[in-house]
């Protein structure tokens, strides 16, 4: 009898990874698929970072690192937080992990008890509620639609907090919407949180540098809240280092110690060579980061302009990350090619199989009225993808 644990049976599979797999299968059959489903930069890791990794291999950085990461990397992160964010941390308040994904999960598993509530603004990254479930907590979804730029209000936050609330997960710039909270918006949320001392903030800032409105703002900047904020960040998006798997948390030392205790029992420290590469990313030139940001901004402008020309799409202008999250519920109930589209997942599958463009339905992001498109691809691909989407959608009647 093959019986998986209840813990595993409570989880949903990752919709983004499932869509990538489906599009890869079609490609393998010779179908020309344009993939707008992936959440990673299409650039290569900058040369100076790769050189640092090669040097680390030659110098035999090949043994176990401390669980929290090498002191040199943690000190580089401390310097980054000070210089770029104006935030004061010590190396003891930093813990590195196998990507920001593990950093988020580590923090949730360290803070959340069975029955604790964790507020998750929707649209959300698909893994947040699943991680809360893994910790036997209860995800409390707070919906923010396109009419409010996919950002929750202080009033919504206040209404969602109960005596059982343990944490709020806040992602800015956001996956899947690209929305960015301004300093004023964060201050208003912080004013609510200050009144509820039992609530911690897990601030996912992995898209920090892919930002089109100027300086990134962190909710950790407010002194009255800083001791209850855990910043999550890493090198994946800003430095095109998704496969290197280095993320980190910065937060109160007692939480960091808890994360280290947890990580010490199930993965230990992250890859030694990747850590040396990440160190070079933080202390070296930041020019490639800005070059990539400019390219993403140009693509953002292109895809927004083209998507606004698609009849039936409702489009906002994302201020960060590399996703467009159009509302497309006007197509539900329509049919073409012997199939009826009833929801965003079916629409995404229709676009893949009829239009040969891979997107991800919004259901698993907590927004069943939308689909997510990644514009981390070439200008040519964006133009052709939207042309195909427009054509395929026009056939739905």
Image (cartoon, rainbow, N blue to C red):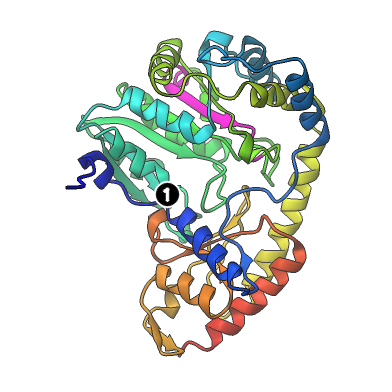
Q: Residue at x 60, y 13 (%)?
A: 88
Residue in the foreground of this view, choosing between 307 and 237: 237
Residue in the foreground of this view, choosing between 270 and 314: 270
Residue in the foreground of this view, choosing between 343 and 35: 35
Is 69 on the left-hand or right-hand side of 365? right
In the depicted structure, whether residue 296 falls above or below residue 204 = below
In the depicted structure, whether residue 291 falls above or below residue 258 = below
Examine the image and state in which quarter residue 214 appears: top right
Q: Residue furthest left?
A: 1
In the depicted structure, whether residue 52 falls above or below residue 182 = above
Task: Give the secondary structure at mark 1.
Answer: loop
Q: Residue furthest front?
A: 1
Q: Position of residue 3 (x, y in %)?
A: 20, 45
Label 1: how many Cα within 10 Å (few below 14, some 14–19, many 20+): many
Q: Position of residue 123 (x, y in %)?
A: 43, 52
**Magenta stretch contains residue 236:** yes
Q: Residue at x 61, y 63 (%)?
A: 35
Q: Position of residue 374 (x, y in %)?
A: 60, 58
Can residue 85 be seen by looking at this rendering? no
Range of residues picked out in magenta: 224-237
Quarter the C terminus occupies: bottom left
Examine the image and state in which quarter residue 79 appears: top right
Q: Give the number of callouts.
A: 1
Examine the image and state in which quarter residue 391 appears: bottom right
**Magenta stretch contains residue 255:** no
Report which residue position mark 1 lands on: 126
Q: Residue at x 55, y 86 (%)?
A: 394
Q: Position of residue 207 (x, y in %)?
A: 60, 40
């Amino acid at each position: 009898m093959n019986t998986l644990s209840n813990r595993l049976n409570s989880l949903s599979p990752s919709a983004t990874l499932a869509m990538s797999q489906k599009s890869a299968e079609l490609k393998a059959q010779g179908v020309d698929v344009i993939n707008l489903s992936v959440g990673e930069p299409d650039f290569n890791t900058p040369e100076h970072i790769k050189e640092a990794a090669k040097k680390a291999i030659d110098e035999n950085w090949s043994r176990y690192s401390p669980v929290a990461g090498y002191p040199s990397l943690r000190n580089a992160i401390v310097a980054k937080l000070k210089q770029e964010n104006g935030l004061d941390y010590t190396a003891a308040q930093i813990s590195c992990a196998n990507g920001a994904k593990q950093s988020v999960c580590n923090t949730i598993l360290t803070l959340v008890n069975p029955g604790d509530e964790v507020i998750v603004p929707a649209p959300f990254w698909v893994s947040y509620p699943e991680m809360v479930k893994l910790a036997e907590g209860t995800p409390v979804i707070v919906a923010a639609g396109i009419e409010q730029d996919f950002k929750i209000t202080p009033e919504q936050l206040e209404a969602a907090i109960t005596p059982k609330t343990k944490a709020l997960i806040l992602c800015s710039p956001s996956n899947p919407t690209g929305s960015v909270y301004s300093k004023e918006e964060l201050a208003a949320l912080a004013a609510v949180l200050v009144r509820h001392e039992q609530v911690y903030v897990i601030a996912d800032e992995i898209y920090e540098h892919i930002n089109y409105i100027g300086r990134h703002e962190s909710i950790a900047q407010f002194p009255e809240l800083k001791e209850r904020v855990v910043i999550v960040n890493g090198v994946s998006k800003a430095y095109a280092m998704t496969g290197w798997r280095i993320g980190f948390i910065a937060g109160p030392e007692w939480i960091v110690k808890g994360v280290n205790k947890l990580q010490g029992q199930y993965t230990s420290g992250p890859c030694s060579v990747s850590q040396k590469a990440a160190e070079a990313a933080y202390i070296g030139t930041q020019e490639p980061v800005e070059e990539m940001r400019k390219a993403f901004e140009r693509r953002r402008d292109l895809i927004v302009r083209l998507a606004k020309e698609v009849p039936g799409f409702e489009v906002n202008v994302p201020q960060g990350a590399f996703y467009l999250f159009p509302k497309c519920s006007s197509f539900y109930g329509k049919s073409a090619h012997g199939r009826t589209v009833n929801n965003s997942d079916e629409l995404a599958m229709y676009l893949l199989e009829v239009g040969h463009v891979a997107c991800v339905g919004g259901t698993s992001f907590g927004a069943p009225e939308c689909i997510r498109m990644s514009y981390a691809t070439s200008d040519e691909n964006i133009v052709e993808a939207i042309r195909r989407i427009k054509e395929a959608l026009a056939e739905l009647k």
